[in-house]
Amino acid sequence: MSSSPTSHETPGSAHEVKETEQVLDNPPSGMRGPQAGEATLQDVAGRDGRISPPGAAATGRGRASTSRSSMGYGGHILAVVAVAIAIGLIVTTDIGAVVVVIGTALVTGTILYVWSRIVEGRRRALDRTVTFAVTSAFLLAMAPLISVLYTVVSRGLERFDGEFFAESARNVVGAGGGAQHAIVGTLMITGFATLLSVPIGVLAAIYLQEYGKGPLKRWLTFFVDVMTGIPSIVAGLFAFALFSLFLGPGIRLGVMGSVALTVLMIPIVVRSTEEMLKIVPNGLREASYALGVPKWRTVVKVVLPTALAGIVTGVMVSIARVMGETAPLLITTGVFSSVNWNPFDGRMDNLPVFAFGQYKNPGAVAAPYIDRAWAAALTLIALVMLLNLIARLIYRRFGTEIR
């Protein structure tokens, strides 16, 4: 398109504009980027700078893909062979299992790095080696858990029967009897500890998150952190000393064990509840305040229902955490072979103390006592796993998705 020059244009400038438009419409080949299907200089040039035919780049990429695929299969085969060799050495030799596993992992990792370095290059070899190291560390961390679980299940199933759950150990010498009294005691002691710790922990968390300010909040947070790390035996000694002041020395009650477990549960409940309250969006609180709702009613009607599933999950996890404590219950509840339904009257046995007593003081024939100890340990693990499963189901079913 041509236009006549104005007072601001000259014929020469109009000609330059026209040439510029032609260059923009049809740029030289050196100014254009690669189009679909075109090979770039990097594609057709080798490492030494020489130009290769256009098809050589595609061929190189195909070979690299084939090398990575073969290396992937080879890595899997190498891992299977290493596991088989490790198992064979553990079964057929006297070398310790830990030494065999660590040695096999080091040798396998070295072979994998050298093989990948030759086939794929330094970067891929380093990536595969790090992936192998992380995976090996995870499996090594899981090995003790799997070993403990396998041992407890295999040894505990021998007495994991109806008699074990329906009868107590009263007047039982040798084979027979069960742990009904210990199961009842565990549920009673833990249940009463939950009734004591949950209200205190939830209210303390609400204060820290919604109302706390200044030095009092800092000191309360500090003491919660300290209580989280105290040994369980200290909680048992505290409960024993507290009740001895009022009821005299040598007293043993089920409620004493509940108080000891309460000391251990409160910081867990406080921390879990506080974290759940932190993730409630401030927009929900501000919307409630904008409607003229007072703060206490906002906390009760808006904040707590939003975080309820997470709070319940934290409570279930805290129960599972203290259910297997043995040291504080040895001091506070004592040993008792009959069913006691009243935590305020007399001694009350429980599963951790029952398993410890059966293992520590077997009779003339030790096998029945050891079998009862393993069955009690299996029952305790089953209760803890059940509580964790319930906590996960509650969170997945009733948890509020916060974006």
Image (tube, rainbow, N blue to C red):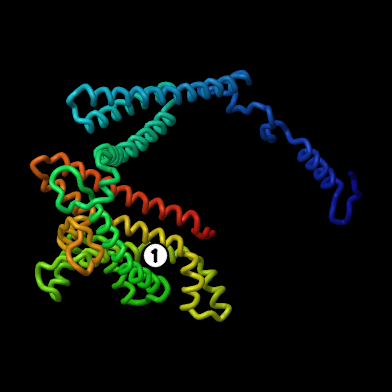
Task: Identify whether 275 is placed above or below 396.
Answer: below
User: Residue 270 in the image: x percent, y percent?
Assistant: 34, 66
Report which quarter residue 256 is drawn in: bottom left
Image coords of residue 352 (percent x, y): 22, 53
Q: Secondary structure at mark 1?
A: helix
Q: Quadrant of the N terminus?
A: top right
Q: Is residue 170 left or right of residue 45?
A: left
Instruction: Note whether residue 102 is visible.
Output: yes
Crowding at mark 1 (Cα within 10 Å: few <14, some 14-19, many 20+): many
The residue depicted at 35 percent of the width and 67 percent of the height is 198
Q: Quadrant of residue 42?
A: top right
Q: Residue at x 19, y 44 (%)?
A: 176
x, y percentage for residue 235?
A: 20, 64
Q: In the visual, does 286 lie left or right of 160? A: right
Instruction: Residue at 19%, 54% (x, y): give it.
Output: 353
Along the line of sight, which residue is nearer the eye, 150 or 63? 150
- Given the current orientation, which residue lies at the most extreme right position? 4
Residue 144 visible in the picture: no
Q: What residue occupies the far left of the structure in this picture?
A: 364
In the rendered image, the vertical position of residue 193 relative to residue 38, given as above or below: below
Residue 196 vertical placement versus 100 (above, below)? below
Q: Which residue is mark 1?
A: 273
Judge from the rendering whether residue 121 lies leftward or rightward of residue 174; answer left or right. Answer: right
**Quarter of the rendering containing residue 275:** bottom left
**Residue 59: x and y, percent?**
58, 19
Q: Return the residue nearer the eye: 28 or 401.
A: 401
Q: Nearer the viewer, residue 153 or 12?
A: 153
Q: Which residue type carries mark 1?
A: Thr
